[in-house]
Amino acid sequence: MKELNEIILPEELSYSQEHEWAKKENGIIRVGITDFAQDQLGDIVFVELPEEGTEFSQGDEFGTLESVKAVSEVYMPVSGTIKAVNTQLEEKPELVNQDPYGQGWLLEVTPKDPGEMEKLMNKNGYFEMLKGDA
Amino acid sequence: MRYLPHTDSEIQDMLQVIGAESLDDLFSPIGQACRRTSALNLPQPMTEWELDRHMAVLAENMGHSQQSMSFLGAGSYDHYIPASLKHLVSRSEFYTAYTPYQPEVSQGTLQAIFEYQTLASRLLGLEISNASMYDGASALAEALLMALRISKKKSTVALSTAIHPHYRQVVATYLQPMGFHIVDIPWGKDGRTDLSHLPQDDLAAVAVQSPNFFGCIEDLSRIAQAAHDQKSLCITAFTEPLAYGLVPSPGSQGADIACGEGQSLGIAQSFGGPGLGMFCSLKKYMRNLPGRLVGQTQDDQGNRGFVLTLATREQHIRREKATSNICSNQGLCATMAAMYLASVGGTGLRELARLNRDKAEYTKNAFTSAGCSLSFPAPTFNEFVIQLPRDAEEAFCQCTEKGIVPGLPLGRYYPQLSDHLLVCTTETKSKQDLDNLVKEVCS
C-alpha cells in the first residue's frame, strides 16, 4: 500500500469525506474515487453503478465497488440526476485502480444545487483529513 | 458407562477456579421460578437390547414401516435409494467432513459441491447454482428476498396458493417482519395458478410451484411472460425435482430463479428432514445470489482447483449488507444428490420419471373407473388430487386401520377441499399396491 505522500491528489478536484472526488465541467459534475480509496480497496473486480436518470441526494449510496478483499459502498458527493455512467467498467473494473481520475471515473451528475460543490474539500483539506485518519 | 463429558472431580476443579461452592451456588443467579426442582420425567434406563426392542415397536407404528404402505407425497417422496449411494456416502471423507472454514485445504469437499452445482443447474436449466440451502421452504424465502433486492424499490411479491402451505408459512415468517407485502394468487378450476389475479403494480416477483401442491404442472412459460411484462422475476419452486426428468426445466420455460426441495434425489425421508434446498438462477443475478458458491479455477502451476468464490456477498465480509444471513449449506445432502444424479444418469432419470408419471396415470384411471373423480384436469407428474364421495378424513382413517396411508386429506390445509385426497405414486409401488389402494379408498 502507498505511503500518504505517494497518494496522487490533483489540484483541480473537490473531495468528499467518503473519498470520492468531484469535478465540474460545463455544468456537469464527474465523480470517481480517490487514489487513496482505490489503494485501500486493492484490486477492484466489480463495479455496480446506478441507472441513468436516477436521482440522488448528497451523501446517498449510489453503488458498490467490489475488490478481492472487500466490498465498499460509494456515496454521492453532490445531489443530482445521473446523466451518464462509465460503462467501460463493466468489462474493465481495474481501470478504477489504474486511472482513478481518468478512465476510472464512475459517473456524471446533473447537479441539483451547484452550491454543494463549495462544501466539499480541496486538495489540502482532504490531505489533512487523511493525515488525521492515518 | 455414563455419557457425561465431565467427571465429578473435573467439575469440582472448575468450580474452584471460578470461586463457586457448588453447582447450586453457580446457578443461584437464576430465579427459583425458572429452575427445575423435580427430577426429569424419564423412564428407567434400558439395556441396549431392551432399547433396540423399544425402538422397533415404535417404528412399527409408523406409516413408513415394513407393514404399511404409504401414498403420501406432499413435499416428501418415497423414492428408492440405490445401495451404492448408501455405501459411498458412508465414507468418512464425506460423512464426517465439516463446513469448509478453510476452504482451499478441503479440495474434495469443494469438488463434491462443484459437481452438485453443475448437476443441479443442468437439471433446473439455469446457468448457476449455489452450494445449496437448508431446505425447499427456506430456499423459496431466500429467492423472494433476492428478487426484492434485484428490483430495489419494489416491495410486493405474488405467491400462488398452490405452493406448499408450509413453504408459504416460512415465506411469511421471512418477509412480513421486513415490511414486504405478499399477495396470494388463487388457483383456477384446472388446478393451476390463475394469473388473472396478479397485482399490476410494485411487483418484484411472481412465485409458483411446479408441479404444484396439487401435483399439477404449471404453465411456466406463460407465468414467466406475465412476470417479465411487469419487469418482475419469475420464481419457480418445487418439491419434486424428479419431475424435471420428464417435464421441461424451469430455466427452459423462462424462470429467473428455480428453488426447492431436493430430498427426492437420493435423500431418505427421515421423518421430515434434513432436506436439501436447491437454488439456481441466471448468471446476471450472480452477485445477488444467497449462500455460498464453489468455483473452479487453476493454481499457480496450472492444476485444476476449487475455491469458495464471490464471498464478498457473504455475511463474514458484507455484514448487514450480505445477500443472506445463511452462508452455510447442506454439504452431505448435496453430496448425496450429486451421487444420486450421477448414478442414475440422464437416461435413468428420464426412465425413472416416466415410471412415476405412468404409475400415477394408471392410478388416476383406476380411481375414475371406481367412481371417484379427478379434482383438476391439468397434467400431473406423480401426484394428483381425487374427489371422494365422502369426507377424505373418514377414508383416511379407514385405510390407515388396514395399514395403508392413502395420501393427504386436503381439508387440513384447504377447508374447502375436505372431500379431496392428494395421492402420490412413485416407482416403489407395484401394480398390486396401486389396485389395492384404489379398492380400499373407494370401498
Image: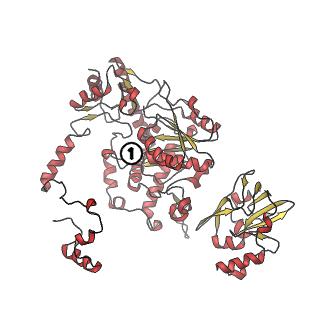
Residue B12 in which image quadrant: bottom left
Q: Which residue is mark 1?
A: B263
In the rendered image, the quadrant that contains the N terminus of chain B is bottom left
The structure residue drawn at horizontal position 30% and vertical position 68%, both measured from the top left corner, is: B29
Residue B209, placed above or below residue B364: below
Q: Position of residue B175 (x, y in %)?
A: 50, 47
Question: Who is closer to the viewer here, B389 or A131?
Answer: A131
Position of A9 with respect to A61 (left or right) is: right
Q: Nearer the viewer, residue B218 or B320?
A: B320
Give the residue drawn at x 44%, y 37%.
B243
Pick the front one: B389 or A119: A119
- How packed mark 1 is, by other alpha carbons closer than 10 Å (few <14, some 14-19, many 20 or more), is many
User: Residue B49, percent across and down?
Assistant: 12, 53
Say which element carries label 1.
loop
Residue A94 visible at all: yes
Q: The disc labelled 1 sits on which kind of residue?
A: Gln
* B158 to B83, vertically: above or below: above
